Amino acid sequence: MVDSLKKPAFDEIRPGVKAPAKDTILTPRFYTTDFEEMAQMDISPNEDELQAILEEFRTDYNRHHFVRDDEFEQSWDHIDGETRRLFVEFLERSCTAEFSGFLLYKELSRRLKDKSPVLAECFALMSRDEARHAGFLNKAMSDFKLSLDLGFLTKNKKYTFFKPKFIFYATYLSEKIGYWRYITIYRHLEANPEHRIYPIFRFFENWCQDENRHGDFFDAIMKSQPQMLNDWRAKLWSRFFLLSVFATMYLNDIQRSGFYACIGLDARDYDIHVIRKTNETAGRVFPLVLDVEHPEFFSRLDTCTENNVKLAEIASSNTPKFLQFFQKLPLYLSTAWQLLRLYLMKPIEVTSMEGVVR
Ligand SMILES: [Fe+2]
Ligand SMILES: [Fe+2]
């Protein structure tokens, strides 16, 4: 009886196998690309750096890192109710995002094998890392008596097509933001161990180094293709991808501030820190970055999160669906307007020689 109170209700596709979260504009995506175009890319302008990164991947620093130790071997039933729901959701989202990387990198390594061996091997070794990350998270879900059927996800989730250039912008940013997310949680819990209520966070230090190396790989690939970084289109797309990645994370995390609170973090402060750091990092490769210090930057995002709260209230009300549409419309328009204004905000040009192969 008590158990049913402790166990939040999740939809299951089979006993113990969680039904994947519904796809929305804010859920982690799966990607596919133009493999032929990628195979034809000439990486020689930055081949030395790519070769050096490949050597690092081969070294496999985290070969023995992802091993569950004794601390996992206990009952986690004391993490219950809403905290448990938030935990499972965090693990699921993280696992899906890691697995998305695995699928894309694996497919790229397969398709590039005979045509672009250096890239193919880099992708194979990155997919090795992402498989470990996703597997470790899925195993953590089983501590909460649930898991994800990754085979089912592979077959049933929608894939978003991006041209190689956009794959590079998007994956570069998601690897670097992943690095800053993991390391920020790790350092916070290192300073405040009383909030480390589950052992997985201890693994984030070495784990985030994988993401950092993956990000460096995409940095090096983009630098081998200067045409992807040095024209007006590159500037517009850099702004677009920076804003999409930051806004998606912000809206997601503020909506789930309960999760961050249970590990002693303020979701908003955490996100602001991660966004600042990722933006700064992106300046090493992108021709420009966003002016995140501008007072309007986060206040506009806050308006979007407030709209989201209202949208959720409307969706869970008893108002008939067609009336809900008219209640929601001004909120969607307001969010679109805020995002447009954010997009049009004057960016910061990266004036150094970064982004140019030297
Ligand atoms: Fe990863
Ligand atoms: Fe990664």
Image: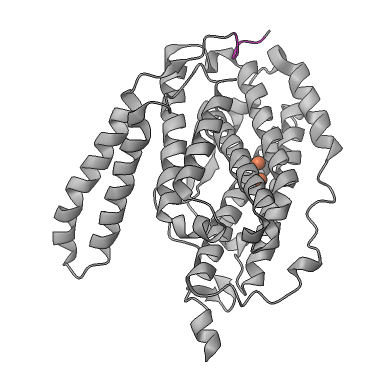
Q: Is residue 165 left or right of residue 329?
A: right
Going by the image, does 113 lie left or right of 38?
right
Q: Which residues are magenta?
A: 353-357
Residue 223 location in percent, x, y?
A: 63, 17
| Quadrant position of the C terminus in the picture | top right
**Figure label count:** 0
Ligand 2 occupies quarter: top right
Q: Is residue 135 magenta?
A: no
Taking the spot 46% from the left edge, 60% from the top edge, the residue there is 258
Q: Position of residue 26 (x, y in %)?
A: 42, 49
Q: Residue furthest bottom?
A: 1
Q: Is residue 355 magenta?
A: yes
Q: In the rendered view, does 180 fall on the left or right side of 206?
A: left
Residue 235 placement: quadrant: top left
Corner quadrant of residue 49: top right
The residue shown at (61%, 68%) is 147
